[in-house]
């Protein structure tokens, strides 16, 4: 049963990483800010701006 629980925890952690939840938590800690809708929006816009500002070759 412990193995199944561990697999579930790993799956949740993977989903949190893919959904940027972990990155958002790290962002809040690094900048000393509290969670809010406005802060999530600021974080998301910054991530998208950085992602699409880099030109892709070929």
Image (cartoon, helix red, strand yellow):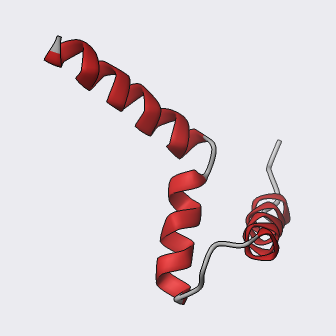
Q: Residue at x 83, y 68 (%)?
A: 45
To which quarter of the image does residue 8 belong? top left
Query: Which residue is farthest bottom?
Result: 32
54 or 29: nearer the viewer: 29
Q: Quadrant of the N terminus?
A: top left
Q: Is residue 48 left or right of residue 29?
A: right
Residue 55, given in percent of the width and then of the height, sits at: 82, 59
To which quarter of the image does residue 2 belong? top left
Query: Which residue is farthest left?
Result: 2
Q: Is residue 15 above or below residue 3?
A: below
Q: Is residue 25 above or below residue 15?
A: below
Q: Residue at x 59, y 64 (%)?
A: 24
Q: Residue at x 26, y 21 (%)?
A: 5
3 or 26: nearer the viewer: 3
Residue 13, given in percent of the width and then of the height, sits at: 42, 38
To which quarter of the image does residue 37 belong? bottom right
Q: Residue at x 50, y 55 (%)?
A: 22
Residue 39, given in percent of the width and then of the height, sits at: 74, 76
Q: Is residue 28 left or right of residue 56?
A: left
Count numbered badges in the picture.
Answer: 0
Q: Quadrant of the C terminus?
A: top right
Residue 29, given in percent of the width and then of the height, sits at: 47, 79
Q: Is residue 52 left or right of residue 33?
A: right
């Amino acid at each position: 049963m412990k193995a199944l629980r561990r697999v579930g925890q790993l799956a949740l952690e993977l989903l949190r990483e893919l959904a940027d939840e972990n990155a958002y938590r790290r962002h809040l800690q690094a900048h000393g800010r509290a969670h809010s809708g406005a802060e999530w929006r600021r974080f998301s816009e910054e991530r998208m701006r950085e992602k699409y500002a880099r030109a892709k070759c070929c």
